[in-house]
Amino acid sequence: MKFNTNKQFAFQKIFILAVCTVVILPFLALLFRAIFGLDSDPSVWIHVTRNVIPNILSNTFSLALYTSLFSILMGTYSAWLVTLSDFKYKKILHICSILPLIYPLYVMSFIYVGLFEYSAPTMTFFRNEWGINLKQFIDIKSVTSISLIFSLCLHPYVYLLLKQAFEGQGDHLFKVSRSLGYTKVESFLKITLPLAKPWIFGSLAIILMETLADFGGVSVFNFDTFTTAIYESWTGMFSFITATKLSAILIFFALLVLGAEAKLTSKQKFFIKSKSGFVAPFELSQLFKSMALIWLLLLIVTTIFIPSYQLFSWCKDNLDLQSLLNNYPYFYNTVRLAFITALVTTIVTTLLASSSRFLKSVNWERLTKLTTLGYAIPGSIIAVAVFGLFTKIKISLGDFINQNSFLYFILVVGLMTRFLSISYKNIFSSFKRISPNLDKAAALLAKPSVIIFKIHIPLIKSGIISGFLMVLIEVMKEMPMTLMLRPFGKDTLSVKIYEFTSEGDWERAAIPALLIVLAGFISIVIMTVVEKIGSKTK
Amino acid sequence: MNILQVSNLIHKYDKETILNDMNFTLKKGEILCVLGPSGCGKTTLLNCISGFVDITGGKITCKEQVVSESNFTMPPEKRNVSLVFQDYALFPHMSVKKNIQFALRNKPKNYQEEKIVEVLKMVGLLEKIKNYPHELSGGEQQRVAIARSIASGNDLLLLDEPFSNLDPNLRQELRSELRNLLKKNEISAIFITHDQYEAFDMADRIAVLNKGKIEQIDSPRELYQNPKNTFVANFLGSKNLIKAIYDENTSAYTCPLFSIPRERIEMSEEVYFYLPNDAIQLKESDFINHDFEVLGEHFRGDNLELEIKFRDIEMSISRPAYAVNIRDKLLKLYFNTDLIKIIPV
């Protein structure tokens, strides 16, 4: 281990260390308190270990298991159809396989819960017209149903990564396998699929992280998991230390997923991208064609038709000027919070990226990478962590700080911790496209601060902008942290959705939900555009 | 016995004819190089033979068995045809051993173990048996890929520009290594390349492809000495072509340098003299001679490359430096008209 510790670039080093501290310290403090605060609130803790933990453990596990299973199956099937078969409607399937990303889990969840309510129009229709009580067949609040609904939203991650994996392989390996005596199916099972393993694990990690982190979705189903238990023990039982302990357990699982992901996806780099062309080798038989078509229609109905129909029909009845005006303050709060967070995050990441580039040291780069750890950690835990640490600091400083501005500050810090990795990815990848020789040439002519503003920032502008927009939209969709840390009177759209859905008031939740889905739609468009630009500049 | 017979092969894609009426055969142990500019249909030809694309017309026969016809395509896994690609196509998730074992399915365990050692010894990589592809150099990876094809026991090997990712020295080394291996194991091969020297090195016969048609298929020497037309001559022969004009009075083809009596070639409008290297001599002799102006000299180590001009005829020749005798920027050349060919466009 050799750190570049000479005095050159002192500002850059201090900056990286400072960001690392802000991001990592709350978690260390949280773990410290969880371990050494065992004797506080003993009665609550005993109650929690006896009555809550066994239940949430099994719930969280079964939800994670089923959701990853369904998502992998759905995503792999779509990816196989789009890349390896001669399915006629590939382009439509491709769009339908990405589009579900626009729904936050909690929006999709409350749409389906609302759809299957006893008094819902569809249920009434089935009862009155055909005498069928759908409730007998479908229990919308069972683990299976919840994981299916979650998988509808999450399988695009599997789809996108596997599509990339299949296409990247090129067709030479497949052809060699066949020339050595293996049929199409054998070659797929022995070559194509095993080669995609790192990508499957990568997408599995994303699904697990999203499922573990979800709060809004499971609370709509009244399905207790770690995140709801953390929220309950803090706001319901007023035991912050219990929330801290539960968080520590969940952090353990999150880090486990993160570690497994890092290990299992590390081989990706050896599977060099092939330059060879790609001809879809599988010709679908009549039966398989019909199956593919049914799958496509099912996707369209469940992820496009039902959600949009349901949202619009709820909105229709109370979509007037008054209700829009009622929602305006929440919209304003949401956009303001998202804008401030995205701005802070982007500035911090740009300076991080630029600093790490100046230092040109593997260890400093690793340290910089450490600042992105927050993406693996559920929002509710980050809320507990930053609240715990910064309240201690605030108390020791004295009570001249306004509680509301304090909460706003830690909320922004927490959100930045959670979404730093998004802008990091965008900015670092555009940095990588700049030749290091450019830096050398510039270093001969100017000092670092000038290089940052005159050379780096103009060149990575597209990465900065796309990172900024993606963070902006993620913050708009974020629910648990915003819910737990929001200052008084600063309710956002997602907070309102939580409040309305917890009372079963779907109609009123629909307008903020529609606004958030629109934001999600914009983020998908940005993602596609950035990808297009990226592939062009390559 | 013919390992492969291609007769009247036609392949169309979206109404565009990619391969047009191709005919050739390949004997056991024979190496055929397919040479041609990019987009001439070389890779499509391999895809037809290996069974990855259907053919529109004609017939492909492997060892007396029809494998492709206009309404029938035998799947690639049943053809006993191996493939080697430019990007090596080793399975990155398998060790060298497993890669070769992959080609030995349904064989007894003992046989597998013996064969793996045998083919790895052939390519000199036995010590890398446990390594993974990403731990090998490009040359080593290609050797493993060749070993894998030999192990498969298939008697036809198709190679699609296998060495073009390697540096020139290594390329040369691997060429002769591959040729020896193929000959020793009596494996027939079709070797695609765009490098004429590679083709000269490897091939028993060379097929020159242009726009989906075989322009000429012959031994390297025959192709060089007797190209059928200017395309073949340009692609692999000497670049020295001089336009020839027919003189009715003398019944001869003429150019400012010489004239050669010959019957008129029908069909073709334009006719050229093709001058292989040995038709142009520096040594004093009775042959017809001319003084050429030397426009440029390029030192190439063994040889001196000269750009020369006589009136409006520009040529280039390459000769050992000691043999070149330039006086006042002039060089006297002697032309052996017996070796000069007259070819159509």
Image (spheres, rainbow, N blue to C red):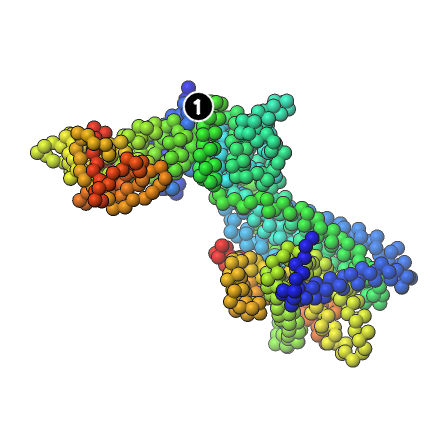
Q: In which quarter of the image is residue B58?
A: top left
Residue bearing mark 1: B29
Q: Residue A520 in the image: state x and y as whole percent.
A: 60, 63
Judged left or right of residue B191, residue B270 is left
- Which residue occupies the extreme top position in the image? B1
In the foreground, A486 or A361? A361
Q: How crowded is mark 1: few (under 14 residues within 10 Å), some or many (20 or more)?
A: some
From where the camera sits, is residue B171 visible?
yes
Residue B245's quadrant in the figure? Answer: top left
Residue at the bottom extreme? A400
Instruction: State the residue at coordinates (76%, 56%).
Output: A251
Question: Closer to the camera, B178 or B88?
Answer: B178
Vertical comparison of B9 with B27: above or below: below
Q: Disc 1 on helix, strand or loop? A: loop
Q: Which residue is drawn at 36% across and 30% down?
A: B206
Tell me residue B156's x, y (percent): 46, 27
Question: Residue A468 vs residue B53: left or right?
Answer: right
Picture coordinates of residue A317, whole percent (x, y): 63, 70
Residue drawn 47% across the image and 29% down it: B178
Work out whether residue A518 or residue B291 is closer to the camera in this orientation and state it. B291
Residue at the left extreme of this rendering: B249
Which residue lies at the image location 61% right of the left edge and 31% below the top edge?
B127
Q: Where is residue A146 in the image (x, y as percent from the top left)?
A: 71, 54
Mark yes or no: residue B102 visible.
no
Q: Mark 1 lies on which chain?
A: B
Judge from the rendering whether residue A45 lies leftward or rightward of residue A267; answer left or right: right
Q: In this view, does A223 lie above or below B186?
A: below
Q: Which amino acid does label 1 sit on?
A: Gly
Position of residue A366 relative to residue A18, above or below, is above
- Depth check, front residue: A144 or B241: B241
Q: In this view, does A312 lie above or below B258?
A: below
